[in-house]
């Protein structure tokens, strides 16, 4: 049996050809931290640039005296949220139902926790993402004075004294990119003192990132920080040394932050979108000054977009994985359009760990990898083996999702519950998680290895995966078999709990198999109690059958792309695992 570790430095694959994205028989996915050495050339280039930090010329440049201007303003291909922009005109920040009044707002004080604001609101304010929303609301004559007033308040608190979280590497990186893209909004005034202060802070932020980008957590935060450095190197006069230094750092951050198949190491679709957005914004900076985009950046965008499309449903929206909500097709389409990348969905992500099967009008997504390493994901989920199924534009089987949107509509207790195995369409043994969720919110022991077999057969596609999440505590391996017909109308599954080798004989234990249903699916039990008819509102009729266990319909919920929870239902099959092994077969069939 072949073995492979899902490290970002594994050989690259082509996300658009059928042969390149096939899975080797017996593939093993092992959860490991990601790290990689730095080449000698990169170390020399970085050291050379660092030696210039204390020169008089560099200090003058940082103070905005070499000369005090931006060479261009990149075009942001993404549209903002008009509703949030109008809220800013009305005097408050608005993010996913959270409101933060601007009047009396102390930018020097922590925003998170103030008036119920979440860390996401703090990032929104200090990262200046709100500029994109404000820009959507009207002509510059109307929006620029508002942007300038907020900018003055922020500069008064932070221009001279860097402090967390406003000056965290990720927030600073986003801030540089949004300041550059919306420079016309914040630099329209003829007040030369104010303009000088803005540009001085731009240069100071770049200097801050020069020294702190690699202190950001591995993954998207570090990539964003280096994107800010490259943006500054391109747009500030005399920035060629910083550009070279930034490109080396960005390339290194990408190698540590994305797997070779293009998926982010946090395994979060939401983080994947943030990474693509940051790379798209820095690409726009190259275009603005008419400098050729480095090949590594273009190649990364191709891989990351293909990986993102690989977890889309029939409607083009994203599945609910690793704390992410179900992002709408419109947002995915807008991001992909802004990136300028045209590619096919990645069907089989070897390292990112998501499998995609498209047959007829049916799309099936499978989480076929361990959860991310604890320090790489704030809202990592115990979801190994979970599935989602859609029929055309309609979703049928889902996961609850949305844990990363904890805030006004998702209280912390609910967010924690959304990360559990029970919040996903898979098997739960003895009401416990396949990977532990510790009291501090990090992921603990559980799934460390997944074995995956995928075959394309004459009569359809077959996936077999197993994980060791319950071996240590219960002595059972969970194995899931899926077979999907060529037309997508017949889906057969089997979930097994098998005694692990070299472990003591396991004991009887209760288990539950869950299938969470989309909000517009209306389920009803059949007369024999072993089946459910599921009618999609204004859509198809599906039938579910199980061969054993007690079948019931219970309440559930689903979080949409705006962080709003919706009441829905779930199919629940309860049974007892026996020491010699247990098997539960089930069938999903489109009957109308």
Image (spheres, helix red, strand yellow):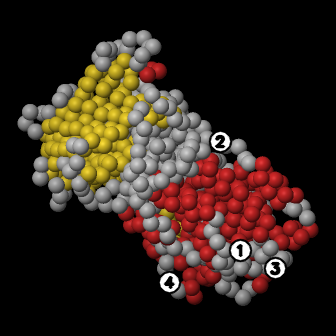
Among the 4 quarters of the image, the one containing residue 179 = bottom right
Tag 3 and tag 4, C-beta contact below 8 Å: no
Q: Circle 1 sits in a helix, a strand or a loop, which is it?
A: helix
Tag 2 and tag 4, C-beta contact below 8 Å: no
Tag 1 and tag 4, C-beta contact below 8 Å: no
Instruction: Using the numbered discs, state the Cα–Cα distance from disc 3 to disc 2 in whole angstroms.
Output: 39 Å
Q: Nearer the viewer, mark 2 or mark 4?
A: 2
User: Which numbered tag is attached to residue 138?
Assistant: 4
Residue ID at (62%, 47%): 256
Where does label 3 land, which residue?
67
User: Which numbered tag is attached to residue 235?
Assistant: 1
Instruction: Using the numbered discs, state the Cα–Cα distance from disc 1 to disc 4 in whole angstroms.
Output: 26 Å
Instruction: Using the numbered discs, state the Cα–Cα distance from disc 2 to disc 1 in whole angstroms.
Output: 31 Å
Please identify the residue farthest to the left as the structure is shown. 527
The foreground one among 342 and 216 is 342
Q: Nearer the viewer, mark 1 or mark 4?
A: 1
Residue ID at (71%, 51%): 214
Where does label 2 land, which residue?
35
The foreground one among 589 and 351 is 351
Q: Is residue 206 above or below residue 139?
A: above
Is residue 142 visible in the rendered image? The answer is: yes
Q: Which of pointers 3 and 1 lies earlier in the amino acid sequence?
A: 3
Residue ID at (16%, 37%): 545
Q: Circle 2 sits in a helix, a strand or a loop, which is it?
A: loop
Q: Nearer the viewer, mark 2 or mark 1?
A: 2
Residue 257 rendering spot, x and y as whole percentages:
59, 49
Residue 406 rendering spot, x and y as whole percentages:
48, 50
Q: Is residue 462 above or below residue 127?
A: above
Q: Circle 4 sits in a helix, a strand or a loop, which is it?
A: loop
Q: Which of pointers 3 and 2 lies earlier in the amino acid sequence?
A: 2
Tag 3 and tag 2, C-beta contact below 8 Å: no
Instruction: Using the numbered discs, state the Cα–Cα distance from disc 3 to disc 4 in whole angstroms.
Output: 32 Å
């Amino acid at each position: 049996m072949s073995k492979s570790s899902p490290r970002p430095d594994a050989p690259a694959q082509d996300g658009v050809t059928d042969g390149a994205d096939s899975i080797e028989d017996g593939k093993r996915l092992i959860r490991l931290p990601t790290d990689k050495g730095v080449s000698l050339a990169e170390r020399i280039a970085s050291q050379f640039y660092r030696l210039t930090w204390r020169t008089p010329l560099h200090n003058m440049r940082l103070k905005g005296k070499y000369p005090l201007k931006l060479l261009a303003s990149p075009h942001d291909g993404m549209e903002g949220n008009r509703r949030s922009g109008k809220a800013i005109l009305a005097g408050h920040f608005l993010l996913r139902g959270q409101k933060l009044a601007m009047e009396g707002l102390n930018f020097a004080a922590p925003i998170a926790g103030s008036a119920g604001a979440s860390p996401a609101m703090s990032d929104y304010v200090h990262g200046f993402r709100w500029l994109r929303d404000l820009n959507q609301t009207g002509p510059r004559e109307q929006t620029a004075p508002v942007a300038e007033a907020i900018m003055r308040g922020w500069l008064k608190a932070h221009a001279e004294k860097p402090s967390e979280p406003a000056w965290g590497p990720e927030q600073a990186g986003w801030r540089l990119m949004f300041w550059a893209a919306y420079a016309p909004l914040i630099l329209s005034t003829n007040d030369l003192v104010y303009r000088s202060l803005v540009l001085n802070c731009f240069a100071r932020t770049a200097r801050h990132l020069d020294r702190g980008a690699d202190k950001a957590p591995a993954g998207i935060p570090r990539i964003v920080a280096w994107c800010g450095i490259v943006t500054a190197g391109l747009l500030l006069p005399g920035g060629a040394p910083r550009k070279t230094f930034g490109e080396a750092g960005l390339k290194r951050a990408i190698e540590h932050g994305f797997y070779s198949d293009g998926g982010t190491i946090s395994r979060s679709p939401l983080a994947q979108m943030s990474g693509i957005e940051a790379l798209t914004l820095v690409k726009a900076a190259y275009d603005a000054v008419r400098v050729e985009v480095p090949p590594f950046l273009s190649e990364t965008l191709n891989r990351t977009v293909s990986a993102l499309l690989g977890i889309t449903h029939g409607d083009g929206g994203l599945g609910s994985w690793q704390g992410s909500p179900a992002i709408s097709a419109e947002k995915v389409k807008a991001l992909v359009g802004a990136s300028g990348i045209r590619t096919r969905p990645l069907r089989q992500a070897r390292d990112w760990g998501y499998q995609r099967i498209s047959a007829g009008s049916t799309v099936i997504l499978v989480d076929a990898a361990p959860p991310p390493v604890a320090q790489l994901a704030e809202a990592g989920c115990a979801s190994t083996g979970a599935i989602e199924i859609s029929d055309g534009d309609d979703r049928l089987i889902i996961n609850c999702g949305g844990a990363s949107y904890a805030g006004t509509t998702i209280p912390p207790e609910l967010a924690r519950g959304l990360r559990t195995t029970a919040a996903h369409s898979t098997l739960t043994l003895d009401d416990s998680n396949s990977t532990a969720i510790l009291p501090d919110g990090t992921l603990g022991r559980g799934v460390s290895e997944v074995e995956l077999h995928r075959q394309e057969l004459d009569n359809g596609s077959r996936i077999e995966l197993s994980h060791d999440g319950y071996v240590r505590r219960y002595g059972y391996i969970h194995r899931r078999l899926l077979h999907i017909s060529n037309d997508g109308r017949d889906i057969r599954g089997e979930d097994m709990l098998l005694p692990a080798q070299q472990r003591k004989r396991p004991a009887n234990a209760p288990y539950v198999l869950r299938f969470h249903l989309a909000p517009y699916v209306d389920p009803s039990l059949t007369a024999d109690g072993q089946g459910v008819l599921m009618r999609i509102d204004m859509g198809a009729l599906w039938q579910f059958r199980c061969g054993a266990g007690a079948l019931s319909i219970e309440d559930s919920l689903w979080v949409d792309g705006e962080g709003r929870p919706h009441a829905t239902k779930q199919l629940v099959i309860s049974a007892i695992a026996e020491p010699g092994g247990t098997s539960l077969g089930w069938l999903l069939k489109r009957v109308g």
